[in-house]
Every structure is written in C-alpha cells, then in structure tokens.
Image (tube, rainbow, N blue to C red):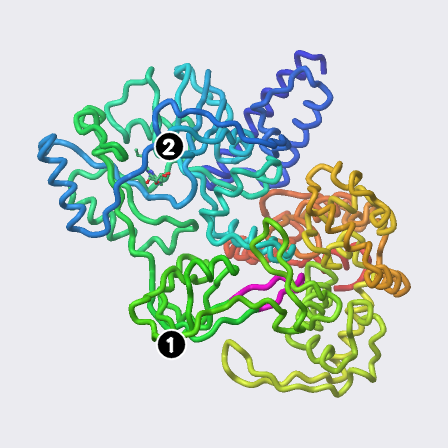
Amino acid sequence: MDKKQINERINKLRQEINFHNYQYYTLDNPLISDYEFDMLLKELEKLEIENPEFADPNSPTQKVGGEITKNFETSKHKFPMMSLGNTYSREELSDFDIRIKKSIGENFKYTCELKFDGAAIGITYTNGKFSKAVTRGDGIQGDVVTANVKTIKSLPLIIEDENIPKEFELRGEIILSHKSFNKINKERAENGEALFANPRNAASGSLKLQNSSLAAKRNLDCYIYALHSEELKFQGHYESLMQAKKWRFKVSEYTKLCNNIDEVFEYIEYWNKKRSELPFDIDGIVIKVDEYEHQETLGFTAKFPRWAISYKFQAERGKTILEDVLFQVGRTGAITPVAVLSPVQIAGTIVRRASLYNSDKINELDLHFGDYVFVEKGGEIIPKIVDVDISSRHPAAYKIIYIDHCPECNTELIRNEGEAIHYCPNSKTCPPQVQGRIEHFISRRAMNIETLGEGRIEVIINNNLVKDIADLYDLKYEQMLGLEKTVIDEETGKSKSISFREKTVSNILTAIESSKSIPYERVLFALGIRHLGETVAKKLSKHFKSINDLRNASFEELVSIHEIGERIAQSIIDYFKNEDNQNLIKRLEQSGIQLEAKEESAEVKGNALNDLSFVVSGVFSKYSRDEIKQIIENNGGKNVSSMSAKTSYLVAGENMGPQKRQKAEELGIPIISEEDLDNMINGNPS
Ligand code: IVH
C-alpha cells in the first residue's frame, strides 16, 4: 500500500471501529464478535504505529488511554453548572407545577428523565471533535479531566455530520454500572485496597485517576442530559436531546416527553417500582419544562433553574438496633469494622450486618452500643448505617471505641499516613491473615486448588497440617484421610459435615499436583502480595521473566513500568525484603511451582484442530476469551462469529446467554468447555 492507500485504510478502519463502538456501547447491539472487533483495532493500531504521520488524538485507538495527568488544571464553565431543587413528595411536585402554570400558563410540556447517580460532566466539542471535559467542581469552575473522559467507549470522539456547530457543549452524568462497580471493588478487595462505598464515589474517583489507561479499565459510561450551542436553534430540550442522540451520544431511551403533571406522576410511579431493575443507580427523576422560550421566562434562582426540579426517591431505609461492632481482619491485615444489627427488612431482604468502613466513619456517626440506627440499602451495595437516632439512646450507653490491637492476635494496629484503614502488621502468624493468604492462593483464579475450598482448608489449617502456602506441597494422603468437622452453614443455619474420604483426598492431591503447571503470572498473583492484582501480576510477569528478576528489581525500575505506581513498587520491595517470604519462595521453588515465564505459556502450537470451526462465548476462568481464540488458531482451527450448521463446536464459558445454548442445541453443535478444548489439543479423550 502506498501512503495514500494507507491513509484511506486508516480512515476506513476508524470509521468502522467508531461505528461498532457505538453499536456495542451505546445501543447495546453488537453486530460483530469481540474477536472481529479486536482484529480491526489491532490492524488500526499497527498502521498508526507504522505511519505516525497519520496519528490523531481522536482516533478510537486512543480509547485505551495512556496519558498521565499529575495535576488537574481547573477551567471556568462557560455557563454555571447548577444543581436542582429537590422534592420528595407528590404535594411538593404539585406545588412546583402550580408555580410554573402561574408564570407561563397551561400550554407547555415536561421532559422527564432519570436522575443518574454519578458525577456531573461538561464536555465541549470543537469542529466536531471532542476537545475538553470538565467536572462540576463548585459549579463555577471544575477540573479538566479530558484524558480520562475520552476513554469512555460510549462517547464519540468525532461527530460525523455535515452541519455541526463550530462549538457545542454537552452536559451529562458519568456513571458506573453495578456490574462494573462490583468488579472494581472485587479487585480492590483482592489487592487489599479500601473499597468504594458506592458507584457514585467510584465514578468520581475514576475521573481523577492520574493514569488514563487505568480510567479506561473502569468501564465508565456517560448519559447525556443536555446539549447547548449558540449556533443551534431548537424549540425545546427534548428536541436538543434527540439531536445529541442522532450524533450517537448516549441519551437514555427512557427520556420521555409528558403532556401534563399526571403523566409525570405516572413516570415517577413507574420508575419508583422499576428502578431496582436498572443496571445502574438512579436516585430520582428530573422534571424539566421542555420549551426553551418558557425556560427563559422562568429563569433561575441563585442556585437552581426555576424550570426544572428533581423528585428524589426515598432511599430504601430501615431503623434497627446496633447490637455490636465486629472487627474483621482480611488476608492483607486490613481491619474492616462491621455492624451487627437486629435483623430488619429493607428492600425485600433481611439485613443483619452493615458496613462501617473505617474508624473515621464510626467517629463521625458517634456510635454507641444499643443505638437505634438508620440503615440504607441500594442496588447490590452492602447496606450502610447512615444515621443515628440520638434521642432514643440509653443515657448509660457505651461509646464504641475503635480497637488499637488486633482482635485475632493482639498485635498493635498501624495506620499509614493518609490512609483510612488500620492494619494488623503481624502477617506471619495472625490467624485470619494466614488463612486468608492460603485461601487466596488456592482460589480458582490463582492456583485453582478448588477441591480444598468449601471449608476443607480450614480443617487442614486447624489440624496444623498447613501453616503457609508452601506447606500445601508437603501434604500427605495419610495426614488428611479421615479428618472430619461439623460446621453450621451461615446461610441456611443447618449443620453439615466436612469429611476427608479417600476420593476427596486423592482429588485434593491431584489438584495440588496440577497446580505446579499453573503459569508464573498466576503464581505471582497467587502469592497475595499487597496491591498486586491479576492485571498487575500479568504486567510484571512480562517485564520480569522470573521471580528472581522481580526480586532484584529496584524501586526505580519498578515505577518506570507503565501502570506500576509507587505504592505497588514499595509493596513488592517490602515483600521480598522479608526473610520469611524469601524462605517461602525458596520452598515453593523446590516444590516445582512455576516461578519463571515459559515462552508463550498460553499457546500450544499444533494441528489438532485442523478443519474444525469454533464459536467462543462467555467468560472463562483459565484463559481469556482472546487467548482461547488464539489457541484455536495456533492449533489449526478457525474462529467464526456466529453459529451455523457447519460450526464444529461451541466453546462455552460462564454467563453465556441462554439463546446461544438453545441455538447450539437446535443445530446439534456440541457444547464444550475450555478444559475439553485443552483435552482435544493434548489428545486426551474427553
Ligand atoms: S439537569 C440546570 N438532568 O443531578 C439543570 N441533572 O442536582 C442541571 N443529574 O449534579 C442538571 N441526572 O449531574 C440533570 N437527567 C438529569 C440528571 C442530572 C443526574 C445530576 C447532575 C447534577 C445534579 C443536579
């Protein structure tokens, strides 16, 4: 290809990728498989690297981020980012409607919108290109968070239209779905980091990440709720949103034009019931007089527009007694205070525990034993104590004092400067830390010794057979055979027996043996080094091909790696400085654990899959979806995006849609797992 053809191909790829991003992230209607999409993106990335003269800051390749912002600049909003007056009842909303009618008469409409519970953002487009994103800040000026917002997949970087105003500004809300929020918190828990209290905090925290490639991984989304341009003349708000929608912005499909206040009440009623079915949080409904002409007449108070108001849903709340506070110790030594409550029904479930986050939160609430507390529960978030009814406190009630020694091993707790969480520093012998580390090590995503799960490892630890992860590899058949324990299942309240019969014991030993072939990058994650999650472990294993190389790395070397910050680097240095850890690694090495990277560990080259075609769907545990596709190709197979009678196999992971399974069954396509695929390649009969 000559340069002209390359340029044309680049432009074509950008257009295609933008279109598929739109189909996938905005319309939730993917037209091609992830694999096909990745291939397009890879081709574009390659062409852009090889032909830097065609680089473009608004190319879809930029959605992965990479920019570092040490200090966020501030920027004044072109017009203030106001907030909304709140109403909490039908009466208050009726009063609003009466006020409006008094001023502008009866001839107008309301636009009703969901009130997204996230972080407000103002985004400017200049000559059809994404140019700036600014947080709300104090309403007058906010922080410039362009690099992070640009990574949001549902936000177009370029608008394809002939009549685009020279400049326009969108206002919207950056949100996190429950699914993405839970994923982030799960990773944070695994890394021993403080959890985000709710998706809103996680979304606004993500906007202030210094490294935009980390923001890109958060899966933020953005709903647009206003479009402003001096050059465009719309009759009203709804029409402007429809224009934004045409330009491929994500405008909620539930935005509705209502003819009168009764229709507004219907909308509110509907969403009050249905909001729990949404995949993200909303905290109310926003009601806006639609016509711009009327908005102008109504104007603003000092703080709010007079033409709009929000109707806030009652948070699902319960009142109950705080019976006790437990201090749980995690595998990294982090202390989590948990409130023990008299059981109370909130939003359809019985709540017995609530999160108290840290000592600052307990002090802020000034909690006493036996207090009547208000507990809120929203979406899939852990219930939290939001308030205390001081008037009903017993005069002699004891104040809850935060512990200063570990409740498990009595070691004095530490709290690092600038951190909210207390830690128990006795990582060596503090029982929940020892057990937590071993449990993490054997977990599915780490060494996958799941046969030791469901309480079995606890029995083994309690019988003093295992004190650290290296001891697992010295376990003997005779030591385990016959062990037994009766436990009470927390969920059902029923007792069940854990017993180590012959079959169980031999399964355990087989799984331990198989774990010796788990690749180095997963071993690195399995070690449970603080702040070292799966992604970081993968990254490190690419730079340091063996644990010895990693151990010898200096702080400077570590932080020079893209995405490895000071906190992670320090944690690695501290880990290897510790003599116990050094001995542990030596013993793991002697047991035959993979502590070096194998060349292309996920890839086995061969022709075992010649002439076979595969559809890969769902989430997998051993490999990523792309790795599976790569393995299929490396072994002579073909990946296809949709099933037909000619498809040889459907490789199914977790969460695969029921339609896919049904279609495979109808067409008679065998459904296989990732293990089956491995077996086919390795010649094992399945
Ligand atoms: S309109 C002048 N519409 O709620 C009117 N705001 O208290 C400006 N919000 O921080 C806001 N969903 O970020 C509007 N559909 C929606 C909204 C919405 C969420 C947030 C907004 C602001 C707060 C207003």
Circle 2 SS class: loop
Q: Quadrant of the N terminus?
A: top right
Say if 206 sits above or below 10 in the image: below
Please state which of residues 35 and 513 is positioned toward the viewer in this rendering: 513
Q: Residue sitting at 45 percent across and 22 percent down?
A: 125
Magenta residues (range): 328-337
Please state which of residues 287 and 333 is positioned toward the viewer in this rendering: 333
Circle 1 SS class: loop
Name the disc covering residue 139, or none.
2
Q: Is residue 139 visible?
A: yes
Q: Percent position (x, y) of residue 513?
A: 82, 68
In the image, taking residue 124 as reference, residue 564 lies left or right, namely right
Q: Percent position (x, y) of residue 549?
A: 86, 47
Q: Which residue is mark 1?
A: 396
Magenta highlight on residue 371? no
The amino acid marked with disc number 1 is Ala
The amino acid marked with disc number 2 is Gly
Please state which of residues 531 and 125 is positioned toward the viewer in this rendering: 531
Q: Which quadrant of the render holds ligand 1?
A: top left
Q: Percent position (x, y) of residue 375?
A: 38, 64
Q: Residue sitting at 62 percent across and 30 percent down?
A: 67
Q: Residue sitting at 40 percent across and 25 percent down?
A: 77
